[in-house]
Amino acid sequence: MIDHRAALARWRRLDVVVRDLPLALLFLAGSFVPWLQSHGTQLGGVPERPFDALAVVVVAVESLPLAVRRRWPAVCLTLVALGFAVDQLRGYHSVAGTALGIALVSAGAHLSRRRRTTALVFSAAYVVLAIALARLGTEPPSEFVTFFLLLVFAWGIGAWLRTTRAAEAGRRRRVAEDTRAAERAAIARELHDVVTHHVTAMVVQAEAARYLTAAPDRLDGTLTAITDTGRRAITDLRHLLDLLNPGHETPSPGGLGSLVEQARQAGQPVEFTENGTPAESAGSADLVAYRVVQEALTNALKHARGSHTTVDVHHGDREITVAVSTAGPGSAAPGGSGRGLAGLRERVGVLDGDFSAGPGDTGFVVRARIPTGNPA
């Protein structure tokens, strides 16, 4: 069986001149079909003349340039118009004269330079042709005006096609730019989440190590924690690079338990509760829940270091709920950018979830409801 899609794809890969050549050959062949010879374009009322050797040349000049109507539209229009003029002045009235309309549509659609000059020159040439035909033929001037309006209409169709094609290309460029901007914003959020969390933990641990020089055992444990945090940062950054490839958007190795343990090593007392079983088709919800906990613990380390923090995560059939409560401020204090919480609100909103962050009865509380199954 013939694979029509493959054949169409191969056809589209051919040079544009090759694809336009069949149309040119069709006009050339059709002009010599006996019962079509008297059905061509007639302008000016010049008496008909049978085909002779010059007619063959004229028909070729009118037809064959259509093969380059998209590659060189100005050349095509010039040759076809010249052949049309001789065709009408000699009285051949061949079917190939219809190619003038196609040449005009193609010029209007594909001519990119000196469009106005081309239109003016063509109009002036038509006036000269109309005067010559009026002397040789019998048609009234109104017929020449009507035919000129038809030619203008053909050019207008081409110009409309050009405008439509340009508008579509502009729309595609805007979509591509918006997509790139969204991807850059997503990568920026990922970098913020990963770098801020791990670097904050390392800074807190390094500050604590200053006061442990008299306790070698505790100092060794703190330095080990700093090393582990640095390794996790490297792992998460590598994971972030994997996110640039489709199908890799998953939480970092170790999951929520690893985040909580890292915060504890940094000196933050964290009570962690996780209920339910993560859904197999949670989509992006697992990653968003991970980032919510990560950002909340980072803020707790920054602004409420040493304050009791509770992390409660519940996996439901259709959603994941996250609540992180820190005794004390636990928020983006003055001097913080607030970019992390704003990014979380945007992430949760993309999945049609709910997000809130602010003072509560037990301190600063970050809450999120994240619907599952959404691959956004």
Image (cartoon, rainbow, N blue to C red):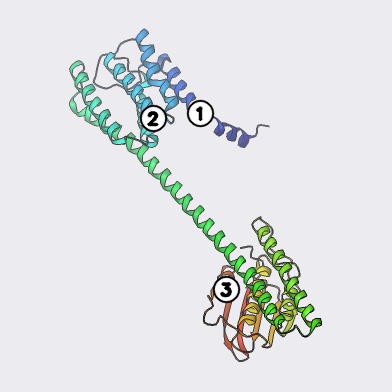
Residue at horizontal 24 percent and vertical 19 percent from the top: 45
Give the image quarter of residue 355: bottom right
Give the image quarter of residue 226: bottom right
The local secondary structure at tag 2 comes to: helix
Q: Is residue 56 above or below residue 336?
A: above
Position in image of residue 70 (x %, y %): 43, 31
Can you tell which of label 1 and label 3 is closer to the viewer? Answer: 3
Can you tell which of label 2 and label 3 is closer to the viewer? Answer: 3
Camera-side residue of 265 and 90: 265
Residue at horizontal 36 percent and vertical 32 percent from the top: 107
Pointer 3: residues within 10 angstroms few (<14), some, or many (20+)? many
Give the image quarter of residue 259: bottom right
What residue would you read off at disc 1?
A: 19
Position in image of residue 31 (x %, y %): 41, 17
Quarter of the picture containing the C terminus is bottom right
What residue would you read off at disc 3?
A: 340
The amino acid type found where label 1 is placed reads: Arg
Label 1 close to label 2 by CB (< 8 Å): no
The amino acid type found where label 3 is placed reads: Gly
Outermost residue to the front: 214
Q: Compute the Cα span from label 2 to label 3.
A: 56 Å
What residue would you read off at disc 2?
A: 73
Q: Compute the Cα span from label 1 to label 3.
A: 55 Å
Can you tell which of label 1 and label 2 is closer to the viewer? Answer: 2
Outermost residue to the right: 217
Apparent side of residue 141 relative to residue 75 in the rendered image (left or right): left
Apparent side of residue 337 relative to residue 4 in the rendered image (left or right): left
Camera-side residue of 50 and 342: 342
The local secondary structure at tag 3 comes to: helix
